[in-house]
């Protein structure tokens, strides 16, 4: 464990952040461009991101909050989506998993800078059936399967050596097995969306924003928002 010095002298940054500006292209997004269902619209934009060769287009920010309302945020990877929601996987003892157990209301955000696009999603997170998690786990590379067993995610560890040693121990433990089983403390979550916002950058900060809101009868209504 390393301790920070008691007193730190901060130097003013030489960068002038106020002058860092980017003028967005004139790529309008109108109501006529939008699909009636937000999942269809998301699929279109995700395909555009893949076609644009964006690095990890499925990277998304997951925002959670604990029972007291204290927020947390991190970047994770989307592993699947359909009309039921958005799926990702994690250790059930991780910080985000504990917070989702306390407060299942979460938010997701996808940012595709080269396309000047952003998608925000709000919804409810819940664990997916174990059978679905097992099917995905079997598709993971061997080293990531070992990592899922070895890492006490979000807990303090003494060193990286300790983590790598644990990986080797797990590797030996399952050396004679035909395949590595999925850990009982690991699996997937699905975020069932209640709100989508599609954002398209426009010149002069007059961006196009459209929100899909889910009604009581599971129908979606679309509204334009001021930038």
Image (cartoon, helix red, strand yellow):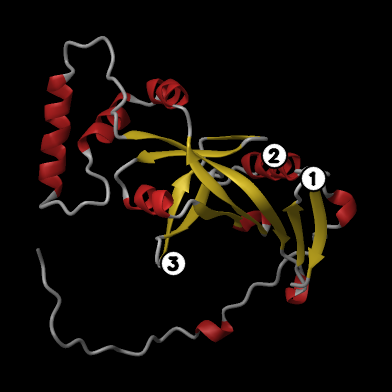
Is 95 drawn above or below residue 36 in the view shown?
below
Q: Earlier in the sequence, mark 2 or mark 1?
A: 2
Q: Is residue 55 visible?
A: no
Whole-percent x, y for residue 217 in the image: 78, 44
Q: Quadrant of the C terminus?
A: bottom right
- Taking depth in this image into account, of 47 and 219 the one nearest to the observer is 219
Residue 219 is labelled as 1
Left or right, residue 121 beside residue 102: right
The residue tagged 2 is 43
Residue located 25% across and 29% down the image: 146
Residue furthest out toward the front: 216
- Taking depth in this image into account, of 53 and 89 the one nearest to the observer is 89
State the SS at label 2: helix
Q: Earlier in the sequence, mark 1 or mark 3?
A: 3
The residue tagged 3 is 69
State the SS at label 1: loop
Give the number of the mark in front: 3 or 2.
3
The image quarter in which residue 90 lies: top left
């Amino acid at each position: 464990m390393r301790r920070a010095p008691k007193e730190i002298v901060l130097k003013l940054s030489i960068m002038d952040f106020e002058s860092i500006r980017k003028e967005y292209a004139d790529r309008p997004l109108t109501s006529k461009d939008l699909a009636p269902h937000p999942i269809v619209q998301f699929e279109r934009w995700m395909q555009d991101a893949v076609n644009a060769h964006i690095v990890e287009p499925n990277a998304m920010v997951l925002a959670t909050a604990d029972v007291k309302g204290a927020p947390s945020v991190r970047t994770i990877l989307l592993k699947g989506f359909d009309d039921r929601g958005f799926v990702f996987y994690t250790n059930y003892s991780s910080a985000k998993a504990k917070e989702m157990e306390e407060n299942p209301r979460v938010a997701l955000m996808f940012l595709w800078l080269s396309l000047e696009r952003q998608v925000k999603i709000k919804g409810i997170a819940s664990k997916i059936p174990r059978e679905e998690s097992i099917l995905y786990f079997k598709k993971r590379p061997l080293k990531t399967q070992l990592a899922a067993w070895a890492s006490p995610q979000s807990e303090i560890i003494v060193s990286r050596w300790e983590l790598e040693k644990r990986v080797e121990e797990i590797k030996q433990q399952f050396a004679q097995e035909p395949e590595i089983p999925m850990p009982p403390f690991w699996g997937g979550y699905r975020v069932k969306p209640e709100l989508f916002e599609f954002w398209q950058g426009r010149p002069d900060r007059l961006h196009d924003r459209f929100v899909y809101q889910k009604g009581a009868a599971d129908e979606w209504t679309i509204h334009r928002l001021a930038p």
